[in-house]
Image: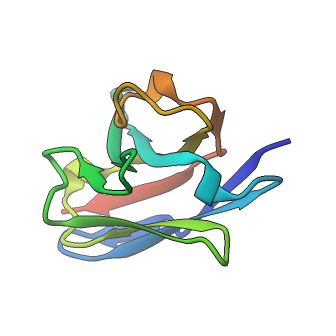
Amino acid sequence: QVQLVESGGGSVQAGGSLRLSCAASAYAISNYYMGWFRQTPRNEREGVAAFDRYGRARYADSVKGRFTISKDNAKNTLYLQMNTLIPEDTAMYYCAATPNQPLSELLHSNYNYWGQGTRVTVSS
């Protein structure tokens, strides 16, 4: 069974950085499409960053230039480097995976497997 475990969340002040990790088991991430999503305190789930079919990174406009998605196939781990954090980044962050090419990489309904989430809180 596919399992995803996120880590690296925490509380930081605005302007700070965090690096989230998502360790996958029972499958090779190189064979799946993967992305990061977040659910805000207003309960909105939005796509943050993901890889497209060509392996290019796609980002939500709100995080472009501040967040970087990457992966280490040898470690079977997906990462999200978050810099210059702002209070609006406060959310529960999830990684997600699908074996099928998503119609839209940043649309959460296109993903089958989800981790339990890791919380990020940014204070002003």
Q: Which quadrant of the view contains residue 104? A: top left
Residue 40 showing in the rendered view: no
- State the quadrant of the C terminus: bottom left
Q: Which quadrant of the view contains residue 25? A: bottom right
Residue 64 showing in the rendered view: yes
**Where is residue 87 drawn, in percent x and y?**
22, 54
Looking at the image, is 53 positioned above or below residue 75? above
Left or right: where 13 falls relative to 62: right
Residue with the most extreme front position: 54
Left or right: where 59 falls relative to 106: left
**Where is residue 97 drawn, in percent x and y?**
58, 42
Q: Which quadrant of the view contains residue 83? A: bottom left
The colour scheme is: rainbow
Residue with the most extreme top position: 109
* Foreground of the two, 11 or 101: 101
Looking at the image, is 24 positioned above or below residue 41? below
- State the quadrant of the N terminus: top right
**Where is residue 63 drawn, in percent x and y?**
19, 54
**Residue under the image location 26 percent in, 64 percent down:** 67
**Residue under the image location 13 percent in, 45 percent down:** 61
Looking at the image, is 76 positioned above or below residue 33? below
**Where is residue 46 drawn, in percent x and y?**
34, 33
**Residue under the image location 31 percent in, 76 percent down:** 17
- The count of marks equals 0
Left or right: where 42 falls relative to 60: right
